[in-house]
């Protein structure tokens, strides 16, 4: 029986911690044009191959709706061709599926078809940190025009940030083969990668996928305040409705432009401090249950918090003229690069209202944002 290890709770910006020597699958390594086409901006799955282990990054083209979705079909084809004894798969947001479709069960059934037993590693952290990570991921995809404060108020109480709700579905699908680990552990200085490799007994299998040059603790660069603000403005102009291919490439371009010009020397830190205490109190009972059940301790003595940095968000703030010009240069460069002509303001307003309406209805129906 082969093992399929699903990593839940790690963002794409953090995947440098996992196997930073990843390569994008190409025709030579996969022998399949439908996994990576030159016409797509980013493939739906990036993978690293070795004789014993297959490492897959789930990059869906949209929210998963069913097993007929293109990303799911491509993963099925990949598993059918692979001879690896171990599969390690992770994604930005495994919870971003319709609530009436049990994604963990779908994955377990798929793995079983190819003689894989599913193990799950659930990585948890304070919800306010999850929210900031989620916000950064959405701006990376040109999918957000709201301020961080408004984003937190809208989604801070959502079930998708309830650790128990996430745990229960994955634990059932994995038949209790689950490991729960804090992203930052109060009782250990070891990085999350080291702790997961040990907890999952992966040392021998995963060693082929670790970078000998960088090691396994490389931290990927996250968007800074300039890149986030440029993304917000491009979303407000309607660019996200006209992108052909995956929008992540545009996010990468924005990030690279900001860093190349030394505009973003710090990671983005959102301005929503007055809301954080309310969010933490709302999820507090569930967090304490999780800590007591899996670690035999309290949440605060188990899960270390990230150092809180001074907010540097530019939305709804006075922006110095030099910074304003720099942001506008990034926006204009992306518009020229994509050959996108923004529609009139009134039409953008209508489009935005329609999008928000669809989003609200989708939430009521149990569909993802």
Image (cartoon, grey):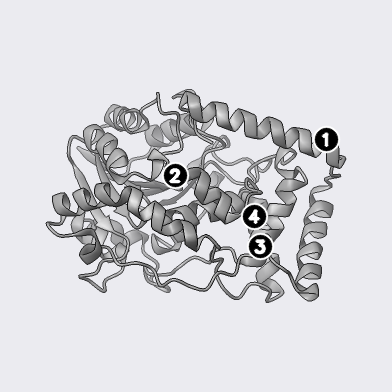
Question: In the image, is residue 221 above or below residue 75?
Answer: below
| Sequence-first disc among 4 and 2 | 2
Asked if marks 4 and 3 touch (Cβ < 8 Å), the reply is: yes
Question: In the image, is residue 318 above or below residue 336?
Answer: below
Q: Which mark is residue 93?
A: 2
Asked if marks 2 and 1 touch (Cβ < 8 Å), the reply is: no
Front position in the image: 123 or 312: 312
Front position in the image: 183 or 19: 183
Question: According to the image, label 4 marks what residue?
Answer: 251
Q: Residues within 10 Å of mark 2 (few under 14, many from 20)?
A: some
Question: According to the image, label 3 marks what residue?
Answer: 227
Instruction: Kindly identify the residue that appears in the image at 23 percent across and 59 percent down.
Output: 299
Question: According to the image, label 1 marks what residue?
Answer: 347
Front position in the image: 326 or 255: 326
Q: Which mark is residue 37?
A: none
Q: Quadrant of residue 78?
A: top left
Instruction: Kindly identify the residue that appears in the image at 68 percent across and 68 percent down.
Output: 258
Q: Residues within 10 Å of mark 4 (few under 14, many from 20)?
A: many
Q: Secondary structure at mark 2?
A: loop
Front position in the image: 175 or 186: 186
| Sequence-first disc among 1 and 3 | 3
Question: In the image, is residue 356 above or below residue 125?
Answer: above
Q: Secondary structure at mark 4?
A: helix
Label 1 to label 3: alpha-carbon separation: 25 Å
Please identify the quadrant where the N terminus is shown. Answer: top left
Q: Residues within 10 Å of mark 1 (few under 14, many from 20)?
A: few
| Sequence-first disc among 3 and 2 | 2
**Residue 124 horizontal/vertical position (percent):** 31, 54
| Sequence-first disc among 1 and 4 | 4
Instruction: Kindly identify the residue that appears in the image at 40 percent across and 25 percent down.
Output: 101
């Amino acid at each position: 029986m082969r093992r399929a290890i699903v990593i839940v709770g790690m963002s794409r910006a953090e995947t440098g911690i996992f196997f930073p020597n990843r390569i994008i699958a190409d025709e030579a390594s996969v022998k399949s044009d439908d996994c990576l086409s030159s016409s797509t901006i980013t493939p739906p799955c990036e993978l690293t191959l070795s004789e014993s282990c297959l490492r897959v990054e789930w990059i869906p083209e949209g929210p998963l709706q069913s097993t007929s979705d293109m990303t799911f079909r491509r993963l099925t084809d990949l598993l059918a061709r692979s001879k690896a004894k171990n599969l390690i798969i992770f994604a930005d947001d495994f919870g971003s599926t319709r609530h009436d479709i049990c994604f963990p069960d779908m994955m377990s059934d798929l793995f079983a078809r190819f003689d894989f037993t599913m193990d799950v590693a659930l990585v948890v952290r304070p919800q306010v940190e999850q929210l900031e990570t989620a916000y950064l991921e959405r701006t990376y995809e040109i999918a957000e025009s709201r301020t961080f404060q408004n984003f937190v108020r809208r989604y801070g109480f959502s079930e998708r940030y309830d650790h128990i709700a996430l745990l229960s579905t994955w634990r059932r699908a994995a038949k209790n083969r689950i490991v729960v680990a804090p992203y930052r552990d109060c009782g250990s200085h070891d990085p999350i990668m080291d702790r997961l490799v040990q907890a999952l007994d992966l040392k021998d299998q995963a060693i082929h996928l670790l970078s000998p040059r960088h090691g396994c603790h490389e931290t990927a660069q996250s968007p800074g305040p300039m890149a986030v603000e440029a993304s917000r403005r491009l979303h407000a102009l309607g660019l996200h409705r006209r992108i052909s291919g995956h929008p992540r490439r545009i996010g990468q371009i924005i990030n690279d432009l900001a860093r190349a010009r030394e505009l973003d020397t710090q990671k983005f830190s959102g301005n929503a401090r007055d809301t954080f205490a309310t969010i933490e109190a709302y999820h507090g009972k569930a967090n304490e249950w999780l800590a007591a059940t899996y670690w035999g301790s309290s949440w605060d003595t188990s899960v270390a918090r990230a150092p809180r940095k001074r907010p540097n968000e530019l939305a709804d703030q006075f922006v110095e003229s030099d910074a304003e010009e720099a942001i506008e240069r990034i926006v204009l460069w992306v518009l020229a690069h994509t050959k996108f002509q923004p529609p009139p303001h009134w039409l953008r307003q209508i489009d935005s209202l329609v999008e928000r309406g669809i989003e609200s209805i989708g939430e009521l129906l149990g569909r993802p944002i």
